[in-house]
Image: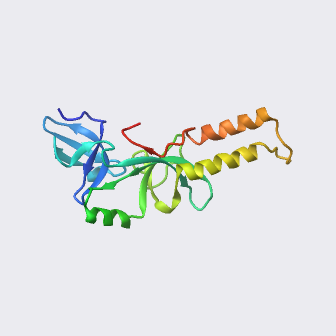
Amino acid sequence: TPPSPGTQIELRDLDFTWCPCVVIKSFRSKVKVRYIGWSEEWDETVPYPHSRLARMYTYTKRAKCWVRQGNEDARWPAIVRLRMPQPGSRHAEEALAMEGKVYVEYFKPGPAVKKGQVNKGEWVNTRNVSGWSAFGRNRVMEDARKSMMGNNGTKRSNEEAIKRLENSIRNAGSTGDSEVANGGK
């Protein structure tokens, strides 16, 4: 039986790129899917089962990341959805390498909804996306250093510093440090 509406799956597009999708309608022998991050004009109806369909995270990846907002140094925690080439497809590899944007979904509460936002996230320039581990560790360490000092430059009590650090970590969206999430975990 085809997957029910709301189920996330992968679809290989006509450029041989695997893309995350969500089933929006299920029929007896086919499914209608929406590419995550794309508007309904790109929806496809595909026979089920089909070689262009795969379970979620068979090929695509998702990873925690930091997204720089505008020209500021402010960053927001998010999940980046990575489309992946069909293994062995030079065409798909080259097409993906030329793209300058990736689709991100912000941890809640996210930045204000912006023009061009699709579904729960938005397409952002790859230059504005940083890996979770490297930036996250540096941010936590910087927050730890700052939390030890009061506004007037005096040391805070350990209890107060720990509370500020815990709030900083909680506000970052997660205390975990895992970069790539596979299998929907």
Looking at this view, name the residue that lies furthest to the front. Answer: 88
The residue positioned 36% from the left and 39% from the top of the image is: 183
Q: Position of residue 102 (x, y in %)?
A: 42, 56
Q: Quadrant of residue 70?
A: bottom right
Which sits in the foreground, 5 or 183?
Answer: 183
Q: Residue 179, position in %: x, y?
A: 48, 46
Query: Residue 152 location, x and y as percent?
Result: 86, 47
Camera sees residue 48: no
* Above or below: residue 158 compared with residue 47: above
- Residue at (16% x, 36% y) in the render: 27
Lateral position of residue 117 relative to residue 133, left or right = left
Pick the front one: 23 or 65: 65
Q: Quadrant of the C terminus?
A: top left
Q: Can the viewer see residue 94 in this picture?
A: yes
Work out which quarter of the rendered image holds the N terminus and state it.
Answer: top left
Q: x, y percentage for residue 100? A: 42, 64
